[in-house]
Image (cartoon, helix red, strand yellow):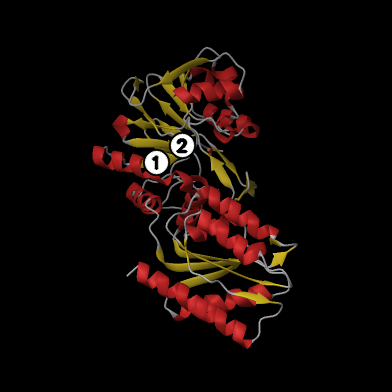
Amino acid sequence: MKPTKIADGVYDVGVIDWNIRDFHGYSTDRGTSYNAYLVVDEKIALIDTVKAPFADQLIGNISQIIDPKKIDVVVSNHTEMDHSGALPRIMHRVGEDKPLYCSKMGGKNLASHFPNAWNYHPVEDGEELTLGKRTLAFMETRMIHWPDSMFTYLKENHILFSSDGFGQHYAGFDKFDDQAGTDLMVQAKKYYANILLLYAPRILKLLEKVVASGIQIDMICPDHGVIWRQGPGRIIDAYLKWSRQEQEKKAVVIYDTMWKSTEAMANAIAEGISLTGVKVKPIHIRSSHRSDIMTEVLDAAAVVVGSPTLNNQMFPTVADVLVYMKGLKPENRIGGAFGSYGWSGESVKLVTAELEAMKFTMIEPGPRLQYVPDGAGIDACIEYGKKIGDAVNAKLL
Ligand code: FEO
């Protein structure tokens, strides 16, 4: 693939993974890219690599600009193997003795992944490296997305190489935000909801520090998806909103169903919510990937979860979604639980306990109906939906 010129002497030499559809449990319906950046100055720096199977493509892309042996410095912003998998091939090609810049934690984590005796240069937060006319500044950004994560800032060009931060799983030859399709922000939102939400307080602190510093950012180059050049402010503002867990007048009704009874309840609850003017979406778990469900949860003020009772438990797919959601730590939501049952009917209690563990403000009692809901049962669900909607309206006046 032809490298993308980003600025004078700055190139994206990364690769596109068109066919990936599952990224460690996250559905990547638009594929992804593993971006890597080459800065050609008096010294030449390679920032990040790609997943191991794409190493040859990366080397081919670099070779269109310079002989890889001429690379003086390799920077690893993040150890996860979608960005470091090609390091052994790259270091072999570039020269095993060439300096490998990383965070302090990166030095430890890379050594745990690769038993090579590389020439590690762990850096302090704020440390700089002169390439000649231009300077790389390293910024520690722990937990965006691993403890080793850092950003690298090319000072003279005002370009931020942000590793996983501001990324999207989005494959395409159009490499810039102003060229990408209309679902770019949806993919960016999905990425945040599924990869970064649990670190929201830390991300917020970092962004506020960056904004307060007045540092000029003309371009943000993440390691996945498109480069933000039209207005990096757009994605920074979105990150501020998501990190503050700002919500819309919106509810999601997430459910699974065995014989359509819980589904009938879900639809009636959604109808009740809708009657209050709150936007609502019923989501059948087995028709939606958990990562898409989480994307909807990100800006929803109310999360209502329905489950049939199966073998005295909640339905297994509901447990899957709740475990996943709990790990990602959505905060400050209105919660609701409901479900149908045949004889024992534990599901509503169990779902309620899970949502309470996430510190959701529960609207109780949630409807719990035996076998097939009758007219009165459906009416009770509509009324419950109205209570949820009223609570959302009261919260977001
Ligand atoms: Fe794209 Fe956390 O790796």
Where does residue 138 sit, x and y in percent of width and height?
37, 27
Taking 233 as reference, is 366 left or right?
Answer: right
Q: In 3D space, how far apart are the residues under numbered discs 2 and 1 (Cα atoms)?
A: 8 Å
Where does residue 319 sit, x and y in percent of width and height?
64, 56
Identified by mark 2, the residue type is Met
Identified by mark 1, the residue type is Arg
Residue at coordinates 43% horizontally, 79% vertically from top-left?
A: 276
* Residue 138 vertical placement versus 327 (above, below): above
Q: Quadrant of the C terminus?
A: bottom left
Name the mark on residue 143.
2
Q: Find numbered disc 2 in the image and state the secondary structure of the residue it sits on.
A: loop
Where does residue 288 sit, x and y in percent of width and height?
62, 62
Residue 139: quadrant of the picture: top left
Residue at coordinates 37% horizontally, 36% vertically from top-left?
A: 160
Check whether the beta carbons of the residues at disc 2 and disc 1 lie within 8 A of each other.
yes
Graded by Cα atoms within 10 Å as few (under 14), some (14 to 19) or many (20 or more), the crowding at tag 2 reads some
> Which residue corresponds to mark 1?
202
246 or 82, which is in the foreground?
A: 246
Q: For the image shown, how many numbered marks are present on the structure?
A: 2
